[in-house]
Image (tube, rainbow, N blue to C red):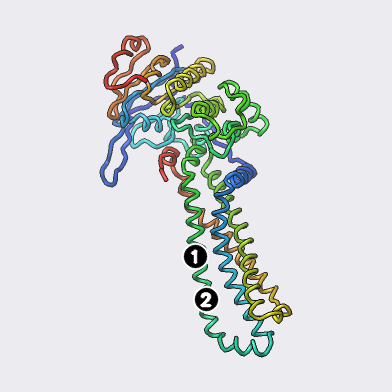
Amino acid sequence: MAKKIEKQLSLPFKNAFQMSLRSLKIRFGRSVIVTMSILLGIAFLMSVFSTNAFTRALIEKGPETIRVSLQYNQEELHTRSIWLVSLSLLVCVVGIVNAMLMSVTERSREIGTMKCLGALDRFVMELFLLESLAHGLLGSIVGSVIGVLIMSIVFLIQYGGALLSIFPAGALLRYSVISIILGTALAVIGALYPAYVSARMEPAEAMRREV
Amino acid sequence: MPKEAIVRTIGLKKTYMLGKIPLPVLKGIDLEILKGEYISIMGPSGSGKTTLFNMIGGLDKPTEGKVYIDEVDVAQLDAYELAWLRCRKIGYIFQTFNLIPVMTALKNIMLPMIFAGLSTDEAMEKARQLLMTVGLGERIHHKPFELSGGQQQRVAIARALANDPAIILADEPTGNLDLRTGKEIIQLLKQMNREKKVSVITATHDLKMLDVSDRVIWVRDGLVERVEDRANLDIKVGEVEGEEGG
């Protein structure tokens, strides 16, 4: 007696990608704000990393006078930089999770509507995670560059041309990669929970939920 | 041949929890809606109309009782089958239109077809036709906020029809519209009901809806108060208690 009910097809990844890209483009202002929060966190993190790299380069290869004064402070600097890194990471995580939480909650009704139209939970998740990935990637790349730039200027002003010959490019690059991976991962992790909750909700509930 | 039931509910109950206090909204609803019927579920605010609507549409889970859509028990479906059902069998229309704000009218209508696995070209062609049908042929590239309420609801109707569903569920489709626009939307729904043989189920307290309904189901305090046929309605339209004519 039962009529045929088929299973909904999973959409190819391409669709989710196109849709999240379009959403990013159209919600440009909103995207910029989310990206900024990641950017700032990563820029801060990267500036701490850069300070570390520059100081180490100066201690190892810098002119005698600078080396002595820095070595004197090295012990203190080390503990302070650990503090700073942890703090900046914390700021970064809170900022990212908050931004993601808001953008998902804000679109709860949209999620509900999409589910009414036949979107699978997986598709909704993909959509948000991809958007978040894009925010995270862009924010942390730009953030890293800004962090390095600012600290380079600060150190150049403070120690002058001596720094140029011993510029720790390798160390900075390594730190940048770490920061970018970290920033992107945090952005995705931050979106994971709110996206999961929204995608799992019954459509009626998602549409009822007021922000 | 007797007409087949497209929607059937048996002892449908829904209880929401307000903190620790259970709040029964639906207290046991038995309904049978036939293929091709135009049904209005009427009742005052808070009577459980929208909750009933959500249950029939598979948008929420009942606390007790069963919902059958086309003789299939909705509770037995897994997530994939439920998504398929929402995509192909049912078209939804909401009071607040619920168009995706970042998409144009055309893209909004294409969305359910994309979910159904149609190619972009096929979906676009059909979406164009649907926009023509609802009388918005020239507005295809407008975003929802560039359209009036009535136009948005027309887009929503076109979107609901995208995958040729068997049922259109409309929750207060005229609730946010003025009198005239509301009438136009009701006419459009009736026209679709007639031309495409799609069953239309509306939850509403708009009395304009009475004129076009085959049957009216009156809901009060989570129970079906009475079911009236069109024939009996004509006499009663003038004397509906406690309601104001639109």
Outermost right residue = A165
Residue A5, percent from left and from top: 52, 31
Residue B147, by quadrant, is: top right
- State the residue position of label 1: A91
Mark 1 and mark 2 on one chain: yes
Classed neighbour count for the residue bearing mark 2: other residues with Cα under 10 Å, few (<14), some (14–19), many (≥20): some
Residue A110, percent from left and from top: 50, 40
Residue A13, by quadrant, is: top right
Residue B104, by quadrant, is: top right
Disc 1 and disc 2: Cα gap in Å? 14 Å
Question: Is residue A60 left or right of B154 when viewed as pictured?
Answer: right
- State the residue position of label 2: A82
Say what amino acid the circle numbered 1 marks. Answer: Val
Q: Name the subunit of mark 2.
A: A
Can residue B156 be seen? yes
Question: Is residue A123 left or right of B224 when viewed as pictured?
Answer: right
Residue A164, percent from left and from top: 72, 77
